[in-house]
Amino acid sequence: MIAKAMTKTSLSKTVPVPSKAVVIARKRKLTPADYLKKILTARVYDVAHESALDAAPILSKKLKNQVLLKREDQQPVFSFKLRGAYNKMVQLSPEQLSKGVVCASAGNHAQGVALGAKKLGTRAVIVMPVTTPGLKIDAVKALGGEVQLHGDSYSDAYAFAVKLGHKQGLTFIHPFDDPEVIAGQGTIAMEMLRQHQGPLHAVFVAIGGGGLVSGVANYIKAVRPDVKVIGVQTFDSDAMMQSVNAGKRIALDDVGLFADGTAVKLVGEETFRIARGLVDEFISVDTDAVCAAIKDVFVDTRSIVEPSGAMAVAGIKKYVALHKTQGETYAAVLCGANINFDRLRFVAERAQVGEEREALFAVTIPEERGSFKRFCALLGDLPAFGGSAAPRSVTEFNYRISDSDKAHVFLGLTTSAPGQSPKIAAHLSRQGFTALDLTHDDLAQEHIRHMVGGRTGLAQDERLLRFVFPERPDALMKFLSSMRAGWNISLFHYRNQGADYGRILVGLQVPTKDQPSFDRYLQTMGYAYVDETDNPAYKLFLRE
């Protein structure tokens, strides 16, 4: 098994009460053959449709293995969850339906229950963690669900929903730990094996509570046991991996919330039993890898999936990197696409690091005339280090004068292959510019890169200007080469935003006697600019 070192943690004092269906399953352990029958007779197509199994040609070429994408992100509620929810609800008695249902969910199961309740004409009370994205909350309300927010995770919402169900006589619809829900999710595997009857080496499935992987594993192991089932979790929400490694269910104290659809502290009793027996391998991935996988899916499909929806693709990429496979066929379940639009900025920022296409450094250069220009020239001549020989681009450059002898620069560079950042750092240091590799430093990525700067008494006679440069390698060097030797750069901020033109903030120390010639220089250099020297924000935060 592929997993990081695990720490055994005892179960929390409050253990969720299993459903009646799980109690029955526990007394007579259901076999893959039992689940096969349930999956073949599952009622899901009143609300779901058979999703496509699409090839991912660009990702396949990059990985040298065929990658297939099971498009559950294209279901009516943009998630697979409606399958299991409806299959459970449609089997309730008229009396149970007359009273209504209740569930706990981070969002996707909630939408499935709300849609199923609308189809069946019953009441649906949905308890959601307070951390649930607004997009999912609004979607549940639009389907007629009654939303109540409670707790920071699924487990917190679950305990509240169980109490609410007892109090109001509502039937609890479990998001994963129920044989009927598991069977509904298993119809995904049934479709996949019908859609692709050729060689299939492994199916990759994201794991939260374990309902999806349990359904997929039961069907595949009953029909094609040669196909591997590989579960994928994020390193900070890996309750299933820890539980399987420990041989008992482990309750996590906290879970990461980036992939909120799989943020589960305690996996199901039935799903643990199934996953422990049928899942061939587990892989953990980090946030950057998931962001890179979201981008991979977009490049091939022009669709944007949520973090949990991209975890299976991230798992394939890590599996290929670890096992060095070629020529095999893998399928990934894109299990959801409910992502808030405002998260895309973070995803785009971290995707570059996740696919190792950007390296970050802290570089120390001498605080002397011409050193900045010499450093920029060195960046243009960096070796390929085993990757592409294409010109390397600066993705970020943050600098503020703070010391009379040394300058500390925050630098981002494009890379063409994994593992290049240490080599670049070593090369810069050999050339006299001490470099610290920050590529995998979360503090640097999330905070420090946005905080370089501040007031300084060294920036006398400073002019602050915003420039618009064309995004081409020679633009900055043209700007630097045309500057007069007596003008010193005291501030520089640039971040590549993927546009044709880059926006750059520059502080230049220009002596009073040189102001007229500096103004002429600005008029003749050919770049659009705005003089921000009198900007109140600049005076408040950056000027002494």
Image: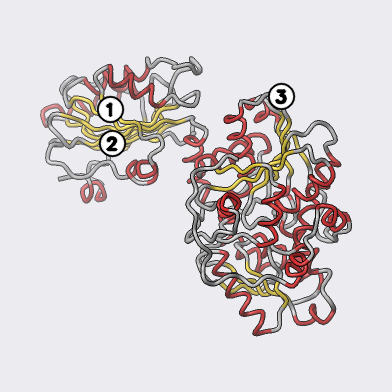
Instruction: From the top left corner, tell me how far across and down residue 414 is, in percent.
Output: 44, 27
Task: Report, in whole angstroms, how far the alpha carbon at label 1 lies from the one at label 2.
Answer: 10 Å
Q: Earlier in the sequence, mark 1 or mark 2?
A: 2
Task: Report, in whole angstroms, how far the alpha carbon at label 3 lies from the one at label 2.
Answer: 53 Å
Task: Report, in whole angstroms, how far the alpha carbon at label 3 lies from the one at label 1.
Answer: 57 Å
The residue type indicated by label 3 comes to: Gly
The residue type indicated by label 1 comes to: Leu
Q: Which residue is mark 3?
A: 327
User: Cβ–Cβ below 8 Å for labels 1 and 2?
Assistant: yes
Q: Which residue is mark 2?
A: 465
User: Cβ–Cβ below 8 Å for labels 3 and 2?
Assistant: no
The residue type indicated by label 2 comes to: Leu
Q: Which residue is mark 1?
A: 522
Residue 22: quarter of image: bottom right
478, above or below 260, in the image: above
272, above or below 1, in the image: below
Q: Nearer the viewer, residue 496 or 172?
A: 172
Instruction: From the top left corner, tell me how far across and down residue 457 is, in percent.
Output: 12, 41
Instruction: From the top left corner, tell me how far across and down residue 49 is, in percent.
Output: 82, 53
